Every structure is written in structure tokens, then in C-alpha cells.
Image (spheres, helix red, strand yellow):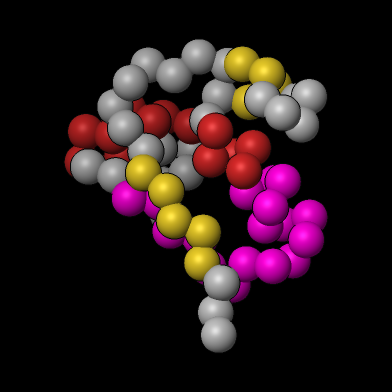
């Protein structure tokens, strides 16, 4: 059975903040993936759902155009 991380990215102007791991990140998804997926090797797939506007504002602007 595959493990999949699923999240939604909105159009807000996200600000950097400190989440539970003590690091500073702009997106909660980044903190959650580092905490529960990558470090534990427990995820087979990461899916981030977003609109065209969210892609422009919060995905492509930070170099994640994939």
C-alpha cells in the first residue's frame, strides 16, 4: 500500500514562521513533509493541490515549476 501526503496550497501571502520543529519555513506543507515524510521515509508520493492563481503566487515564484 502506498503512503501519500496530500495538501492544499492557497493564494494567501504566506509569511515565514516557526512551526513545531523549531525551523523557520514559509509553508506548513514544508514542515509537515520534513517531519513526517522525508525523515521517516514513510511516503511514496506527495500531492499538493492548487489553483492556477496559487501556482503563480506560491509555487512558480519560489522555483517549484514542475
Q: Is residue 24 left or right of residue 55?
A: right
Residue 17 coordinates in the image, percent (x, y): 61, 16
Q: Is residue 4 left or right of residue 43?
A: left
Residue 39 coordinates in the image, percent (x, y): 78, 55
Residue at coordinates 78% horizontally, 61% vertically from top-left? 40
Q: Nearer the viewer, residue 20 or 13?
A: 20
- Does residue 64 appear in the picture of this structure? yes
Q: Dividing the image into 4 quarters, which one contains the C terminus?
A: bottom left
Q: Is residue 43 magenta?
A: yes
Residue pushed farthest left?
A: 52
Residue pushed farthest bottom?
A: 1
Residue 41 coordinates in the image, percent (x, y): 74, 66
- Does residue 60 appear in the picture of this structure? no
Q: Dividing the image into 4 quarters, which one contains the N terminus?
A: bottom right
Magenta span covers which residues?
33-49
Q: Nearer the viewer, residue 55 or 21?
A: 21
Q: Is residue 36 magenta?
A: yes
Residue at coordinates 47% horizontally, 44% vertically from top-left? 64
The image quarter in which residue 37 lies: bottom right
Residue 14 coordinates in the image, percent (x, y): 44, 19
Residue at coordinates 78% horizontally, 24% vertically from top-left? 22
Amino acid at each position: 500500500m502506498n503512503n501519500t501526503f496530500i495538501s492544499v496550497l492557497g493564494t494567501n501571502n504566506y509569511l515565514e514562521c516557526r512551526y513545531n520543529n523549531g525551523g523557520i519555513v514559509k509553508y506548513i506543507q514544508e514542515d509537515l513533509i520534513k517531519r513526517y515524510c522525508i525523515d521517516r521515509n514513510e511516503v511514496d508520493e506527495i500531492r499538493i493541490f492548487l489553483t492556477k492563481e496559487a501556482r503563480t503566487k506560491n509555487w512558480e515564484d519560489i522555483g517549484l515549476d514542475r
